[in-house]
Image: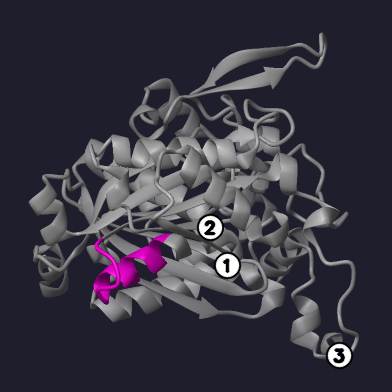
Amino acid sequence: MSAAKTRILQKNDNDVVIVTAIRSALTKSKKGGFKDTHPEYILSAVLRAAYEKAGLNPALVEDVAVGNVLPPSGGASQARMAALHAGIPNTSSVNTLNRQCSSGLSAINQIANQILVGQIDIGIGAGVESMTFGYGPQASPASYSDEVLTTKEAEDCLIPMGFTSENVASDFGISRRAQDEFSALSYQKAAAAQKAGKFKDEILPIKTKIIDPKTEKEHEIIVDADDGIRDGVTAESLSKLKPAFIKTGSTHAGSASQISDGAAAVLLARRSVAKRLGLPIIGKFVAASVIGVPPRIMGVGPAYAIPKVLERTGLSVADIDFYEINEAFASQAIYSVEKVGIPFEKVNVHGGAIAIGHPLGCTGARQVATGMNIAKQYNQKVFVTSMCIGSGMGMAAVFVSEQ
């Protein structure tokens, strides 16, 4: 074991520890279990579960940061409403933040940093997105400055994500076959994990209401499983799908992340405070890094964010037991894994966003909940979570499991 890994496994009272990490199921936008459920309701459920699971008095939660991408006004009022509905008193503060696909991880990073500098002792970093209620033209400005658009890279920020995937595939020679094989494996790992009940400990069952499209009648359901996972997907079956963005391209519906609804929450505390209150400690936050990349190939973000956070912590690629890397598209995930030199068997042990889904603001927090669950099941200690970010960035963070 390297000296850096030994060092981060050590415990001290000023550590930022993870007390609980929980997520909702991820469901298909406009079709799945949350198609008639507003995001603040899903968020409320995971916020309540985060403190109740720990046996914590919610009045001790000092701040809540929520990653959210699509809603008007940043979903600020909805997040505050969700916290109040969850039983967190009005003396606790709430904010939302938007760093696109890394918003949930950015929220965790914000709370961790507030604890590190002594502003708070306990907080929740969360993420939520209903792409049913938020996705589409209403999430974009009506116009942009013509003057700003004369800067080529500023204009590149408006390239649709699917086209940036094609740019990555073209620029770096990621073949259609490689993308189909990677995507099929994501489905296969997720389907196997779901069948074996591997997701149960990280998913909060949520009672909600759904409207039957045939009868138009509302009835109660419990959403407790990711409903976008498909069994039996193979590279051969994916090879029959038509490219979605460019006729001669390689990115298609089966090699892109699913448009989804969901939420996740991570309760963090200073170790000394968690010990004093008798709270469970399941892991700790170590460090996070964000970096910019060219907007036209925004998907390469993890290829640069992961080395940056490893350098900051003194860790090597080999020191990390496994990696949770968001699969925005197969092209960018493959490139990032190969560029960093990560063994593919260490990546997305239970599948990734291609199979499970990618509710934009939720994903960063969801990956931490999944990572903690995987670490416990396979007795692993150190993991990295990372994702690319729209407009050309990448984020990565290091966590330690103490389960």
Q: Which residues are magenta?
A: 108-121
Judged by depth in the image, the label closer to the viewer, 1 or 3, is: 1
In this picture, residue 76 sits left or right of residue 244: left
User: Would residue 258 be seen by someone viewing this image from the given angle?
Assistant: yes
In this picture, residue 47 sits left or right of residue 32: left
Q: Which residue is mark 2?
A: 67
Q: Which residue is mark 3?
A: 150
Q: Are marks 2 and 1 in contact (CB under 8 Å)?
A: yes
* Mark 1 vs 3, N-terminal side: 1
Q: Position of residue 22 (x, y in %)?
A: 38, 40
Q: Is residue 145 magenta?
A: no
Query: Which of these two is toward me, 273 or 91?
Result: 91
Provide the secondary structure element on which disc 1 rests. Answer: loop
Outermost residue to the top: 215
Q: In what quadrant of the picture does the C terminus appear?
A: top left
Provide the secondary structure element on which disc 3 rests. Answer: helix
Judged by depth in the image, the label closer to the viewer, 2 or 3, is: 2
315 relative to 140, above or below: below
Q: Quadrant of the rendered structure where residue 2 is? A: bottom left
Q: Main secondary structure of the magenta part?
A: helix
